[in-house]
Image: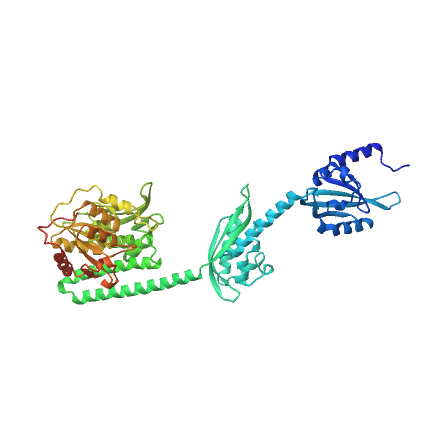
Amino acid sequence: MSTRPSDVALAHLAAIVTSSNDAIVGKTTEGVVQSWNAAAERMFGYSAEEMIGRSIRTIIPPDRQQEEDDILARISRGQDVKNFATMRQHKSGRVFPVSVTVSPIVNEAGVVVGASKIARDISDQMAMVQKLRESEERFRTLADNISQLAWMADREGYVFWYNRRWYEFTGTTLDEVRGWGWRKVHHPDHVERVVARIQRSWDTGEIWEDTFPLRGADGAYRWFLSRALPIRDDSGAIVRWFGSNTDITELKEREERIELLLGELNHRSKNMLAVVQAIARQAAGPHEKEFTRRLCARLQAMTASQDVLVSSGWRGADAQALIKSQLAHFGDLIGTRISIEGPPATLTPQAAQALGLALHELSTNAGKYGALSNRKGSVRISWRVLADRDKGRRFSIEWAESGGPAVKAPERRGFGLSVIDWMSKLSLGARVEVDFRPEGLVWRLTCRDGRALESAETYKEAARGRVAGRKGAEGTALALVVEDDAVIALDIAGAIEDAGYKVVGPAATVAEALGYLAEYPCDLAVLDVDLGLETSEEVARELVTRAIPFVAVSGFDERRTPPIFRNVRHLTKPIDMAELRAGLSEIAPAPRGRAERT
């Protein structure tokens, strides 16, 4: 029986060759073309009439002729050449990439009589490969040259890639730290905590962040802030994690030095307050013991607020911690007769000092005359963080007493009432309500802007708003007071009033001071040079422009103040009030009569 293909089979084969998108070429063992399909014509630019009878080397670039020698040698041995990626040349001279498969053709006797060659244009695939290669090169260039150590892990947390910075710093290889091998460069005192926290992120998909020391190639440990983000696919499933480690050793060392300096400053300021207490006790006469006791208690209250601020690096005070520090002498009543409730809130240093003094006065009064002076009264301290679209986040606090002796309003305005009322208004730009209800004192403070909260933005516009629209001041001599410490401002204002001037302010910020100057025809001013994060230079320039004389006040000596303050009367803190009054008399005429504070 004959094994030759039928006419139908041959027709099918011819149709396949004709319709194929791949170039299909038949050639002899010497490389002479015997068949050339339509796809070959399109791919190489030569018609069948042009190529049949010519050598296949016509489409092979000169520098690749050796490839044909190797192919023909393999074909003659009856071997296939599969998916060989190379370059071939179009009739126009253009060279392009192809994938070639060559198979030997044998006769009935098993002798190789020719070859069948299939060529596929892989220009698009090669272009894609090149783009991927360039993309990977850009990624590696970026990843290997950033300052952070970087790494990637699979969805389960198995780390499979690190950047060059990691290897340079740790001196490790990928085989050493692949998977969970990174634990070997972690400090033994921290590694268990780190593993537990990062495993929680692997399990929950939460962003991971931690701070810990890593061992370098030199054996020394350095501190890093580390963070890892989950990378998700279109369905939201985590496919991998990308992490980085940022060296914060110098930052941490600076923070430790600052903490040390703050501790030393706190220690020295406490020593200074202790000296003040000792002098007050030693100098007090027989009838001044009560005054001395109250003074020392108030100094202790200031120290307690300062301790809370120092513990946070002077970056703010936790509201609850501040309240408890001022009620420490009633510690056994907290949770029973004293309730403290409110959301987490971090107060600015300025707010902590002002509220600390106010809370001290309130608790002292409650212990002597109010709800804590008997065995059944109670105090409820609560606060809120208010959200306002125009004014941002604001702070509100309430002190409410009940169950104590019947309350009566004081007959005179003493220092304690000034602290909880006027000084709080001054320090925080707040609205203060003091309600002497018979059933118990209620004190409420609500800030008009965000200055009480540590995260608050600038309140310059709010400060201008507080002075806008006021009626003009009456009187023959107006004195502007600019001082950001409420206690010192109260002291200066009192001394100026005693000298017969009408006080404008006091202002705690540059914006507030400029607002007062725009509204009131001031005759003179007392300027604190240093207003926390700003100085009063801008106010001084405005005063010079308006030809308004002023006295400068500073904790530094005159040589360390800005130049604009060098040619004016300069007083160093703590202020001698007699010297202040003398300085005012030198720069302005004596006032005619006295008036209340504006």
> In the rendering, at what x and y percent does residue 430 appear?
25, 47
Q: Quadrant of residue 47?
A: top right
> In the rendering, at what x and y percent does residue 84 appear?
72, 48
Residue 100 visible in the displayed image = yes
> In the rendering, at what x and y percent does residue 195 appear?
52, 56
Residue at 51% x, 64% y: name it.
216
Q: Nearer the viewer, residue 462 or 341?
A: 462
From the viewer's perspective, is residue 282 above or below residue 390?
Answer: below
Q: Is residue 445 left or right of residue 82?
A: left
Q: Quadrant of residue 282?
A: bottom left
Q: Nearer the viewer, residue 191 or 151?
A: 151
Residue at 56% x, 57% y: name it.
180
> In the rendering, at what x and y percent does residue 139 appear?
55, 51
Q: Is residue 3 left or right of residue 137?
A: right
Residue 445 visible in the displayed image = no
Q: Quadrant of residue 274?
A: bottom left
Q: Nearer the viewer, residue 127 or 348?
A: 127
Q: Is residue 225 left or right of residue 361?
A: right
Q: Residue furthest right?
A: 1
Residue at 16% x, 66% y: name it.
283
Q: Is residue 40 left or right of residue 544?
A: right
Image quarter in which the N terminus is found: top right
Q: Nearer the viewer, residue 512 or 253?
A: 512
From the viewer's perspective, is residue 556 above or below residue 417?
Answer: below
Protein image colouring = rainbow
| Total marks placed | 0
